[in-house]
Image (tube, grey):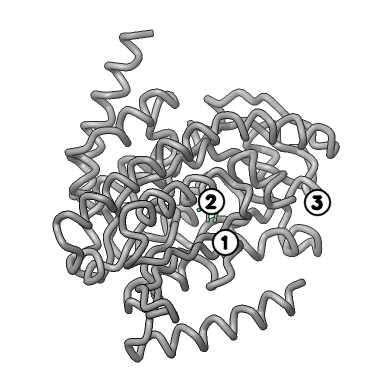
């Protein structure tokens, strides 16, 4: 399977190199739009992206042909971002963790226990004004975000049970390739192993790492529950994914076309979020039948370990202060409504 994936990847990279020479046009004379993501084709993000495709093609189908490449077929997201930067492909779904190296404003989402509740997280993400400044932050790097996707709450999972932070000692846990996540893992007391998402299954299976941290879909959609049987609800992060697009491509759209793309982006997020809630419930049931044990923890014990990271990041990066304060306001507001 890996070999086939590599061959497909090489072929696609060949096609892309050809496209770079300015030939991103299919035989029907349409402009091909390529979207890359790292999940399977049953994942809520893929389903959301299908509505993106449908909306655009229903109105501009004579001009654009949208092709979605799942499963990291065009490479892990940090590599696919580079393809979007150069315009070799047009869009990629990326975790904000991978975006930190392009603009450090994205560090905000890696701050553990930033949001007090899922409702507060959603409210922040729905704040158009706040998001606008974040979405546009990477313009100089050649891409911008056009919408966000829910990617749930991140929790630890491993080959042995993690009930308290003590259990993390001596464990090697995979993190996303982001300096903030590496630092967070150090504070938790585990050894951080940064690697791309597609490498995690084999790394757990072969014992290179003891586990990872992710939402529940990692257990089922990515099959990590086959090799890691303990999932611990310590709720350390809510990290969104961004749909990012090549700036030049987006800027060259006419205002009417851009409007259709924006509507498509909005629809795509609405669909993804609907499927998200349903699929998380299904993933929990499926993981249980795979033999995964779900563990409730005393969250405060985990929180204590990593809260110093808030001060640390705010001191290092003053851009975060405004957003951080805004998030705290929303945290309070949502709590007041409960
Ligand atoms: C989630 C997220 C992905 C991300 C992955 C990871 O699945 O949706 O965008 O790549 O976590 O941990 O790398």
Of labels 2 and 1, earlier in sequence is 2
Q: Secondary structure at mark 2?
A: helix
Q: In screen coordinates, is 57 left or right of 104?
A: right
Of badges 1 and 3, the one in the foreground is: 1
- What is the x, y in percent for residue 161? 76, 37
Picture layout, residue 49 above or below residue 123 = below
Q: Nearer the viewer, residue 242 or 155?
A: 242
Give residue 308's quadrant in the image: top left
Of badges 2 and 3, the one in the foreground is: 2
Circle 1: is it few (<14), some (14-19), or many (20+) Cα within 10 Å?
many
Give yes or no for contact between labels 1 and 3 (Cβ–Cβ under 8 Å).
no
Q: Which residue is mark 2?
A: 46
- What is the x, y in percent for residue 276? 54, 35
Q: In screen coordinates, is 290 left or right of 285?
A: right
Q: Which residue is mark 1?
A: 70
* Residue located 50% across and 46% down the image: 187
For the C terminus, which image quadrant?
Answer: top left
Q: In screen coordinates, is 209 left or right of 165?
A: right
Circle 3: is it few (<14), some (14-19), or many (20+) Cα within 10 Å?
many
Circle 2: is it few (<14), some (14-19), or many (20+) Cα within 10 Å?
many
Give yes or no for contact between labels 2 and 1 (Cβ–Cβ under 8 Å).
yes
Q: CA distance from mark 2 to mark 1?
A: 7 Å
* Residue located 59% across and 60% down the image: 197
* Residue located 77% across and 71% down the image: 1
Q: Which residue is mark 3?
A: 227
């Amino acid at each position: 399977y890996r070999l086939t994936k590599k061959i497909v990847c090489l072929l696609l990279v060949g096609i892309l190199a050809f496209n770079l020479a300015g030939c991103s046009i299919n035989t029907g004379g349409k402009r091909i739009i390529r979207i890359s993501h790292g999940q399977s084709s049953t994942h809520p993000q893929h389903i959301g992206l299908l509505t993106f495709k449908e909306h655009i093609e229903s109105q501009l189908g004579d001009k654009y042909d949208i092709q979605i490449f799942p499963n990291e077929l065009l490479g892990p997201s940090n590599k696919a971002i580079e393809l979007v930067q150069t315009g070799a492909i047009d869009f990629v779904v990326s975790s904000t963790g991978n975006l930190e190296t392009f603009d450090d404003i994205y560090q905000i989402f890696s701050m553990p226990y930033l949001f007090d509740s899922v409702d507060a997280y959603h409210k922040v993400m729905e704040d158009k004004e706040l998001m606008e400044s974040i979405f546009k932050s990477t313009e100089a790097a050649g891409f911008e975000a056009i919408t966000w996707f829910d990617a749930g709450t991140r929790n630890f999972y491993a080959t042995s049970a993690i009930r308290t932070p003590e259990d993390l000692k001596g464990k090697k846990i995979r993190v996303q390739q982001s300096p903030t996540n590496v630092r967070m893992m150090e504070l938790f007391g585990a050894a951080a192993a940064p690697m791309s998402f597609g490498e995690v299954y084999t790394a757990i299976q072969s014992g290179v790492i003891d586990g990872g941290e992710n939402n529940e879909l990692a257990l089922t959609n990515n099959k990590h529950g086959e090799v890691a049987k303990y999932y611990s609800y310590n709720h350390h992060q809510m990290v969104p994914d961004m749909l990012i697009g090549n700036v030049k491509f987006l800027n060259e759209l006419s205002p009417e076309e851009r409007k259709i793309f924006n509507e498509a982006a909005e629809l795509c997020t609405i669909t993804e979020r609907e499927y998200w809630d349903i699929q998380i419930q299904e993933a929990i049931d499926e993981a249980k039948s795979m033999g995964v044990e779900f563990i409730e923890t005393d969250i405060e014990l985990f929180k204590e370990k990593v809260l110093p990271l808030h001060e640390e990041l705010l001191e290092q990066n003053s851009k975060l202060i405004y957003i951080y304060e805004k998030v705290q306001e929303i945290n309070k507001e949502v709590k007041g409504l409960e």
